Amino acid sequence: MARSNLPLPVPFEEIMSRHERGVMRFLLRVSKDREDAADLFQETWLRAYRAYPRLDPERDVRPWLYAIALNLCRNRARDGVRREQVITAVGNEKLPVDGSGKVYRTITENDGYAVVHLHQLMSALPAKQREALHLRYFAGLDYAEIAAAMDCSQQSARANVSQAMRKLKSIW
Amino acid sequence: MEIEKLIGTAGGEFKDEALDALLRRARRRVDSALKHVRRPQAAVGVVQSPLGELLVAVTGRGIVLNHYLLNGRDLAATIESVRPQLDLVEDPSTVKQIGEEIRRYLAGEAKALRQNIELILAASPFQQKVLRKLQEVPRGAVVSYQGLGSAAGAPKGARAVGNAMHHNPVPIYVPCHRVIASDGGLGGYGGGAGRKLQLLRSEGFALGNGDVKLPHSSVWGHRGSKIYCRANCRTTARVDRSRVWFFAGPDHARHAGFRPCKICRPDSAEL
């Protein structure tokens, strides 16, 4: 009597269970703080639920979702609700500095510290490059998805990531 | 220096077990926050009825959508348009009853249609009010656009009423087929004039295919005095038309609690 397979949108619950892990990991790595990440996580899903009916069913959910998460991270950083916190896994020992002011490190020496140092360097990057880098390496988005999430062209997504990498390598 | 590798390990201090625990906690928070903003859930499906294919949505509180599917693109567009108000879940078994109710109704069973109707998809408060007033018009009666406008507090709003009929989310259940032009012309219908004729015929109006006017057998019932007259009674010349319901015949008027006019004697045999 009734026809099946209506062109219905994917149920929101399904989207949530499919992406919640990835989103949480992304927020943890960007905010570096459990409480912040949990707050942002809740806000991300609330916003996503409200905005979901407006999402074109043809469009990909993942970049849309990370765009929401990214915007919230941006807002939080701008509002300065909490100061950027860096987890100091190991004490603040001085680094060997040569005449050019460059800091040299090797990954084998102390991984924990290297990660912290990396976060410091990343937070010094220009916003667009940092965000593109986050999406590429923390969320694992491909360039097309980054372009969709950041509302830019694929070329500039790729350029932002590679410039960020080049800069990081040069000051590492 | 493998900086890519290092970025890959950034955040590695959050181990899988810790992530799972955090996720469980955060998920609970999200669920309780979502409770306040959740849209009503609706069972949705396409049903076949004697009036053609219909897209039907039913919530726990009643039927919210009953949409004539007139062409192929209609289905996706309608689903898109109701998404901001409803969380849709496909459920053919729940909506199947609607097709059955409509079939029985057209066969003449007056009480076949369910009474719980929810007007959450009405486009504006005014349209919702108009649709509520329209629900008062009984089976076997019709009202003019102008009359319905007066009843809803907008005596000059016949066009606006027409608009509300056009956007009626629940046709058949909210009887927008019972609204006609003031001069007795049948007017249009979202599902096509043919369906309007079919519905009115099943409610007792003696209409042939292609008819565009109310039949002569219909009588005028005044909602204030609760008196019904023939259309050619001299009292109808000065009656306020916005307060008139047109009944299919004297029986229908009596059934709705009206009494016959003593001047034109609409119950007597000769017309």
Image: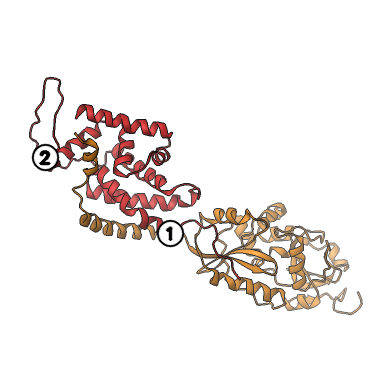
Chain colours: A red, B orange
Residue drawn 56% across and 53% down?
B81
Quickly name the residue at label 2.
A110
> What element does badge 1 sit on?
loop
Where residue A135 sits: x, y (%)?
A: 33, 41
Q: Amino acid at mark 2?
A: Asn
A78 vs B74, left or right, is left
Tell me, yes or no, whether dots 2 and 1 are on the same chain. no
| Residue B229 placement, left or right of B92 | right
Q: Quadrant of the C terminus of chain B?
A: bottom right
Of the pair B41 and A118, the residue shown nearer to us: A118
Q: Quadrant of residue A153?
A: top left
* Host chain of mark 1: B
Residue B42, x across and y down, in percent: 51, 64
Quarter of the image where one finds residue B140? bottom right
Residue at image x 57%, y 69%? Answer: B95
Name the residue located 31 percent from the left edge and 58 percent from the top edge.
B27
Q: Which x, y percent locates residue B110?
A: 69, 77
Question: Residue B38, which numbered label?
Answer: 1
Q: Of helix, strand and loop, which one carries label 2? A: loop
In the rendered view, would you say B218 is above or below A85? below
Q: Residue at x 11, y 40 (%)?
A: A110
Q: Amino acid at mark 1?
A: Arg
Identify whether B49 is placed above or below B111.
above
- The answer for how far apart the CA atoms under marks 2 and 1 are is 48 Å
The crowding category of the residue bearing disc 2, from other C-alpha atoms within 10 Å (few below 14, some 14 to 19, many at least 20), is few
Direction from residue B77 to residue B263 in the image, left or right: right
Residue A121 x %, y %? 21, 32
